[in-house]
Image: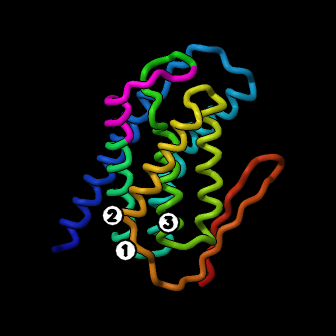
Amino acid sequence: MNIITILQRRRYGFRFLLMLLFLNSLLTYGQQDPLSSSQKTHKIAGDVLLGTMPALALSSSFIWRDGQKGSYQFSKALACTIAVTYGLKLAINKERPNGENNNSFPSGHTSVAFVSAAFVQKRYGWTYGVPAYLLAGYVGYTRMEAKKHDGVDVLAGATIGIGMSYLFTKRFDDKKKLGISSGFIENTPTIVLTYKF
């Protein structure tokens, strides 16, 4: 396989993932009940993390320079997670807690967040997985806070995401010196990635 074929496959795979994330976002908007200021803030944070977590998981394979294996594994896990999640949404047809529509079970935001977190944890270890799981857990919390899902929906989404990631992800063996830390700068949550040459 030559380099042009690899780049073409990667480009089409990336377009496919963007399309899936776009379709995912179409099914998540249209709040009926007014939210408090705090609930709106949590909802927006969860929506931002919906796109940020998969981007961080996908970019992690470039940071570790593990070739296309990591990105390919994550792409398969993410695509299957979205397919299973939305297949179940359409089949089960559970009403959301806010009465907005019948796409409550399972939580799509949570499944995408947890497939991303589980990929990072399984591929690169618990040192990087713990902050990723904390962010994914926060996404689940934001979905309940915004009255989009109940605990069962969030738990099911987390289970689907973790299961798909564990199904498709293999451990990365290279011992590079990459660091991750989190904290707050002026009450704003931050994540810092460092690489020692």
Percent x, y of residue 113 = 52, 49
Mark 2, residue position? 72
Q: Amino acid at mark 3?
A: Ser
Q: Is residue 105 above or below residue 134?
A: above
What is the residue that sits farthest to the right in this orientation?
186
Residue 55 place in picture, x, y as percent: 48, 53
| Residue at the image position 41 percent from the left and 28 percent from the top | 26
Q: Is residue 53 above or below residue 43?
A: below
Vertically, is 17 above or below 36? below
| Image point (68%, 20%), residue name | 35
**Residue 60 marker:** 3
Q: Residue at x 22, y 71 (%)?
A: 3
Q: What residue type is disc 2 on?
A: Tyr
- Residue that numbered label 1 is attached to: 67
Asked if disc 1 and disc 2 are in contact, CB closer than 8 Å, the reply is no
Q: Give the Cα separation between the discs numbered 3 and 1.
A: 11 Å
User: Which portion, as a residue range, is magenta?
Assistant: 85-97
x and y, in percent, of residue 31 in the image: 55, 19
Q: What's the coloring here?
A: rainbow
